[in-house]
Amino acid sequence: MELVLLTALGVGGATVIGAVIGFLFRKLSHTFSDIVLSFAAGVMLSAAVIGLILPSLDYGGKYGLLITVVGIFAGAVCLNLIDRLVPHLHKLAGVDSEHHTASHLSKVLLFVSAIAIHNLPEGIAAGVGFGAGDTAQALIIAGGIALQNIPEGMVIIGPMLAAGVKPGRTFLLAMLTGVVEVIGTLIGYFAVSLASAILPFALAFAGGTMLYVISDEMIPETHAHGHERGATYALLVGFCIMLMTDVLLG
């Protein structure tokens, strides 16, 4: 349990680390942020497939394939429904740091709220990984999500400061988006621990949410600024590093 709690704090704390970087380097180039986010996407892709979806097939027994497929789509549909209520990242990329109107402030706060809400299922995915009993895989999954949270924490600082939000409140709001992820991690872990029968579905559901985030948010965001080639290779590097890590730890 101590490891799960520390991991939850690490996953949520990655957003805070990103926020600190955002304060220190407010003019980070799109090239840098796209490369980092793409690398995180590759790590998450590997973690979703190897750490969540394949174990779901193993734990599902006779109906493993059906449970896994249904779980993947259930996770994706869940995030799709959330997106209809609070669009995330690339859908709110129109938040421009040059405007200071009240409407702009509302858009920025919507952006931050969207990140917080999307962090809940991502945290659940990290917690479910521990429920499978494979600590190494769970840490890889959590690491992938944490990597994604760093650039996410970075990008929310500039728009909030430009919209007139005070630095202290800006940092607090960024930290709260990380707290949501800590809560999600604990929910995922306890849910699977208390009801092991749902483990195959929960693993697939978590994998589906991660695949959705990668395809619907991370890849479009990293391909929106003219750095598609570098972003693609960064994703492949992240995927292969996690693949090698899994083989070596196995």
Image (cartoon, helix red, strand yellow):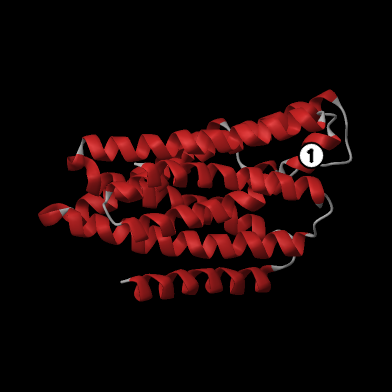
Q: Vertically, is 143 above or below 85?
A: below
| Residue at figure coordinates x 48%, y 69% from the top left | 239
Position of residue 149 in the picture relative to residue 184 (left or right): right
Q: Vertically, is 85 above or below 225?
A: above
Check the picture and name the quadrant holding the C terminus.
bottom left
Position of residue 90 in the picture relative to residue 213 (left or right): right
So how many labels did they put on this image? 1
127 or 69: which is nearer to us? Answer: 127
> Is disc 1 surrounded by few (<14), some (14 to 19) or many (20+) residues within 10 Å?
many
249 or 47: which is nearer to us? Answer: 249
The residue positioned farthest toward the front in the image shown? 2
**Amino acid type assigned to the residue bearing label 1 in the image:** Pro
Location of residue 46 by image quarter: bottom left
Residue for badge 1: 159
| Residue at figure coordinates x 45%, y 47% from the top left | 7
User: What percent of the width, then of the height, locates residue 140?
Assistant: 43, 59
Check the picture and name the quadrant holding the N terminus.
top left
121 or 9: which is nearer to us? Answer: 9
Location of residue 2 by image quarter: top left
Location of residue 233 by image quarter: bottom right
| Residue at figure coordinates x 81%, y 29% from the top left | 165
